[in-house]
Amino acid sequence: MACSDESLVAAHVAGDLTAFDALVRRHGPGLYGYLLRMTGHRHQAEDLFQEVFRRIHEKAASFSGRGAFRAWMYAVASRAVIDAARKRRRDQSVVDMRIKEGERLDPATANPGAEAIAAERRARVRQALDALPPRQRETVILVYYRHLSHAEAARVIGCSIGSVKRHMFRALRSLSERLPDLREDAE
């Protein structure tokens, strides 16, 4: 029987060395994807991944258990992303290491042309997401890609559910305007 996140956090606080590993295995891939989408930098996402789980480890005792662990984890991650952005802005001498990896084609793919078109679409969507204001981008990533509810996203971002809905509406409208040909494909 799988343990709940809350019981794993409690076990970790009580000294169970395997409980934290279980949380990392369970939520690591989703968290890394969130960080990668928020930063656009693989190296920075990896650094933030380590930082987020360091913070969770240190602050596990402060997790109340009233809300979902996943929402709390994304709130910690969101603050880490904001802290990292502030640090980069303060240190103007740091060179922006923005590296966008291109999609790689799988040689075993039956239809490389279709895969190339799909990779190009993903790249365009990623660029359109990057162009959104930070709150809108974060809202889309949390709700659409990380599958958090509007209420969970509101807790992560620190705003009302209505604000999340407003950010989502504006983001989707902006994405629709930036990607009109993709909107037609979806219809």
Image (spheres, rainbow, N blue to C red):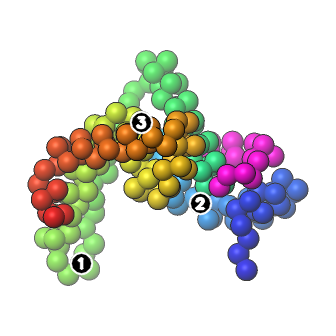
In reply to whether residue 96 is colored magenta, the answer given is no
- Residue range corresponding to the magenta coloring: 51-68
How many discs appear? 3
SS assignment at label 1: loop
Which amino acid, mark 3? Arg
Q: Residue tagged by mark 1?
A: 109
SS at mark 3 in the image:
helix
- As for residue 59 lying within the magenta part, the answer is yes
Amino acid under label 2? Answer: His
**What residue lies at 57% left-to-right and 58% top-to-bottom?**
28
The residue depicted at 20 percent of the width and 69 percent of the height is: 115
As displayed, is residue 104 above or below residue 54? below
Q: Amino acid at mark 1?
A: Thr
Q: Nearer the viewer, residue 38 or 4?
A: 4
Point 50% across, 55% down: residue: 148
> In the image, which is nearer the foreground, mark 1 or mark 2?
2
Q: Secondary structure at mark 2?
A: helix
Q: Residues under labels 3 and 1: Cα distance?
A: 37 Å
Badge 1: few (under 14), some or many (20 or more) residues near its Cα, within 10 Å? Answer: few
Instruction: Compare marks 1 and 2 and give the one earlier in the sequence.
Output: 2
Q: Find residue 69 and report its horizontal and vertical position in percent.
A: 66, 54
What residue is drawn where x is 17% and y is 43%? 178
Query: Mark 2 — residue?
Result: 27
Horizontal side of 67 relative to 82 (left or right) equals right
Image disc number at residue 135 = 3
The quarter in which the C terminus is drawn is: bottom left
* Mark 3 vs 1: CB contact within 8 A: no
Residue 170 x/y as whole percent: 30, 40
Q: Earlier in the sequence, mark 3 or mark 1?
A: 1
